[in-house]
């Protein structure tokens, strides 16, 4: 089966950016219903799930923003956030410099570093209680909004 220009968006390193999914990328690929059924029928993605690029580039993180159907493409994996994590916090956490550095230490490869799903089990993540998660998440969102406004201003 092959990609097309319409259908279900395939999430890959081309369109999973740091904090968002680029649905308008000229490099995006789409799959029809048959391809979706083969790749995603038993484990569909859902709103709030965190997607992560494992290579080229490694470590881009985004959260599924809506209830649309997506195809999880090569070099991209999805995490099911624990019930102990508030919505958005896992994506925030995976984007931090500390976690990104730990991922680099687990990565293999020469020019294009990558991390395997098997090696991710060695990634140890500590997270605060839900009250602190809410506070941190709100601060990060405020900073992201401020940065976006400043970029538009420039």
Image: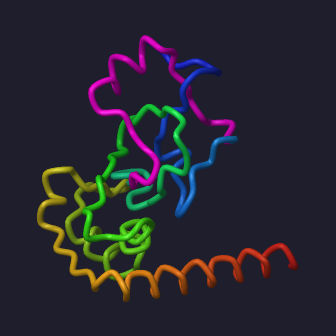
User: Where is 4 relative to 91, above or below?
Assistant: above
Residue placed most toward the observer, 27 or 143: 143
User: Where is 116 relative to 74, above or below?
Assistant: below
Q: Position of residue 128 (x, y in %)?
A: 28, 85
Q: Residue furthest right?
A: 153
Displayed quadrant of residue 72:
top left
Q: What colour scheme governs how the chains and residues are painted in the rendered image of this protein? A: rainbow
Q: Is residue 33 magenta?
A: yes
Residue placed most toward the observer, 74 or 38: 38
Q: Quadrant of the C terminus?
A: bottom right
Q: Position of residue 60 (x, y in %)?
A: 45, 59
Residue placed most toward the observer, 14 or 152: 152
Displayed quadrant of residue 109:
bottom left
Q: Position of residue 133 (x, y in %)?
A: 38, 82
Q: Is residue 80 magenta?
A: no
Task: Answer left or right for 137 relative to 20.
Answer: left
State how many labels appear.
Answer: 0
Q: Which residue occupies 64% across, 21% down?
A: 5
- The residue range painted magenta reads 25-51
Q: Which residue occupies 48% across, 34% down?
A: 70
Q: Which residue occupies 22% across, 58% down?
A: 108
Q: Quadrant of the N terminus?
A: top left
Task: Answer left or right for 9 relative to 118.
Answer: right
User: Where is 37 relative to 25, above or below?
Assistant: above
User: Where is 130 relative to 115, above or below?
Assistant: below
Q: Position of residue 112 (x, y in %)?
A: 37, 54
């Amino acid at each position: 089966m092959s990609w097309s220009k319409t259908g279900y968006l395939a999430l890959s390193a081309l369109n999973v950016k740091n904090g968002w999914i680029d649905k308008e990328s000229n490099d995006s690929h789409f799959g029809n219903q048959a391809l979706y059924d083969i790749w995603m029928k038993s484990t569909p993605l859902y709103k709030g799930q965190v997607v992560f690029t494992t290579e080229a580039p490694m470590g881009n993180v985004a959260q599924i923003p809506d209830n649309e159907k997506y195809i999880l493409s090569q070099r991209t994996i999805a995490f099911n956030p624990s019930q102990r994590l508030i919505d958005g916090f896992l994506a925030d956490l995976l984007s931090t410099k500390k976690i990104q550095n730990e991922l680099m230490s687990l990565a293999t490869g020469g020019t294009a570093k990558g991390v395997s799903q098997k090696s991710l089990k060695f990634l140890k993540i500590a997270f605060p209680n839900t009250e602190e998660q809410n506070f941190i998440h709100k601060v990060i969102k405020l900073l992201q909004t401020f940065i976006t406004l400043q970029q538009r201003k420039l």
